[in-house]
Image (tube, rainbow, N blue to C red):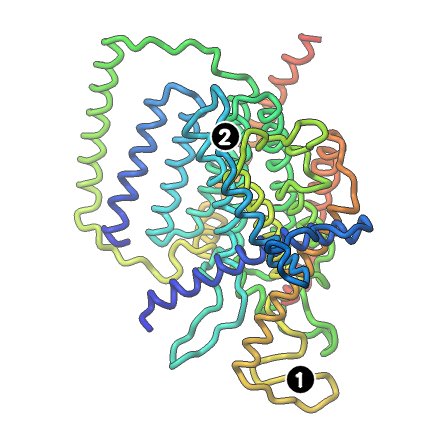
Amino acid sequence: MSPLLFYPLAALTLAGALGVVVARNPVRGAMSLVATLFLVAVLYAGLGAHLVAALQIIVYAGAVMVLFLFVIMLLGADGEPPVAVRKTHLVATLVAGSVLAAGSVALLAGAFPEATVQAVEGFGGAKALGRVLLKEHIVAFELTSVFLLVAVVGAVVMAGQGGTEER
Amino acid sequence: MADWHIAALRAFIAIFAILQMSVFLLWVERKGSALIQNRFGANRASIFGLLPINLGFVNTLLADPIKLFTKEDFRPDGADRFLHTLAPFLALFPALVTFAAIPFGDTIEVAGRHIEMRAVGLDVGLLFVVAMVSMGVYGVVLAGWASNNRWALLGAIRGSAQMISYEVALGMALVAMVLCYGTLDLQEMVRAQGRHIGGVVPAWGIVYQPLAFLIVFVSGMAESKRVPFDLPEAESELIAGYFTEYSGGKQAAFMLADFAEVVMVAGLSATLFFGGWQVPFLSTDGWNFPGMATVAVAPWVVTLLQLAAFTVKVLFLCWLQILLRWTLPRFRYDQLMDLGWKGLIPLALANVLLTALVVLLWGQPA
């Protein structure tokens, strides 16, 4: 991916992420998150991972975030009073953030001494990813599916209980 | 020509085609609805009454944009300035870019270069289409929310629920097509439809997957939010639904997005189920009618015929959607949800299982 494309895109992605944190209005915050997720997908596509990019948009930008927005609009989060930011919060956030940033930079610098690995033929395609997921990591893949199913069933059960009590 | 010239030209052709078709549909719909309802339709557009013949087609296309873009651009009190302006762009964007993945011709060879007849040579074209369709919700949701209008908000909530529901059915039906062709590449899918079953019937997707076509077409119509699925708009209940508070150019953007989605649904259905740019019995060396000698056809004629075939198929499917729109009444909301969740999704799931079983036992048809 050309640096001419990468750096502006990366800057936009970070700006979107910042918008999620800074935005006071929940809908604007959610839309910033949509923009961030979409731009991350564009970065994936630029790095040759077309399948992951498409899935990122379908799952996160297209489905999860729509539900976020749906809930915000339906419940009307406008009435929520904004949480007052205290100085201690700010200091704690800054300290935690810088430790995390320093740690990731140190880790990444050690892990990829020279980031010039040539991608193999068909890298990021549906066939390559499918083979890895469904042959090499089939157990983990299936366990994750079951785990997600349990989460969904649990959510439905909990929502259902709330409903019967109201009636 | 350099490579980027060709890329720019391909992108231009894709966007030009979908814009032209969308605007053309505006007129087709006016005249078509008039035809169905036994009236004349738009017949008053004339340049100062000077032209002796009624060039309704040209005049309507000129008069409409002029009218819309000279109107006051209205923003209601208490509306979110930024998001209110952003919404029409977000509605138009996914509808227009989806066409980038749809092939409109076979690969041609010009001056030793192989040029693909589509805007982007994506190996995951089908997923790209699904991804862009799923982005279409935001225009509706934001338009409704940012307008600070209850009717608009109701329309937006209806719209998002409807579009999420039918996306599931659409995705499931497309899974069956992926199983059938064994690829996510739309160009490969069209190539696979070039054969003939028993040398007579073109091996188009609809022959193998009639149910998937029905589900894709119905969910596609639901995604484009047109009658009988126009509950987000529902002018008799919600004024104009999510775009109640839009006027002028922005309203035109929503209208254009609607028609672009119609073209997109037609393009996707044509590509998956009607052989895309394939002309029956026509291959690169000429016509091969069964039981007859091959009639040689020049390569450039073949390319033109393929382009024409794709256009005709897309226009036919657009016309089918307009016909359905002016024939069926609007669904009630519970009927809409029942059709999506209890009708189309179980059918699509059954179709996926059946297709998987057949492919497992007898292999892919293509």
Query: Disc count in the image?
Result: 2
Q: What residue do we see at 68% from left, 69% from top?
A: B203
Instruction: Tell me where residue B239 sits by quadrant.
Output: top right
Instruction: Tell me where residue B223 sits by quadrant.
Output: top right
User: In the figure, is residue A58 to the left or right of B244?
Assistant: left
Q: Earlier in the sequence, mark 2 or mark 1?
A: 2
Q: What residue do we see at 58% from left, 66% from top?
A: B190
Q: What residue do we see at 67% from left, 84% from top?
A: B288
Q: Residues within 10 Å of mark 2 (few under 14, many from 20)?
A: few
B306, B248: nearer the viewer: B248
Q: Amino acid at mark 2?
A: Phe
User: In the figure, is residue A96 to the left or right of B77?
Assistant: left
Vertical side of B261 occupied by B304: above or below: below
Residue holding disc 1: B288
Residue holding disc 2: B74
State whether residue B105 appears in this view. Answer: yes
Of all residues shown, which one is farthest toward the bottom? B293
Please state the horizontal and vertical placement of residue B253, each as a whole percent of the image: 52, 43
Q: Chain of mark 2?
A: B
> Helix, strand, or loop for circle 2?
loop
- Front label number (2 vs 1): 2
Q: Chain of mark 1?
A: B
> Helix, strand, or loop for circle 1?
loop
Q: Amino acid at mark 1?
A: Asn
Q: Check the picture and name the quadrant holding the C terminus of chain B.
A: bottom right
Please state the horizontal and vertical placement of residue B185, each as a whole percent of the image: 51, 60
Please state the horizontal and vertical placement of residue B96, each as a whole percent of the image: 50, 50
Q: Residues within 10 Å of mark 1 (few under 14, many from 20)?
A: some
B190, B31: nearer the viewer: B31
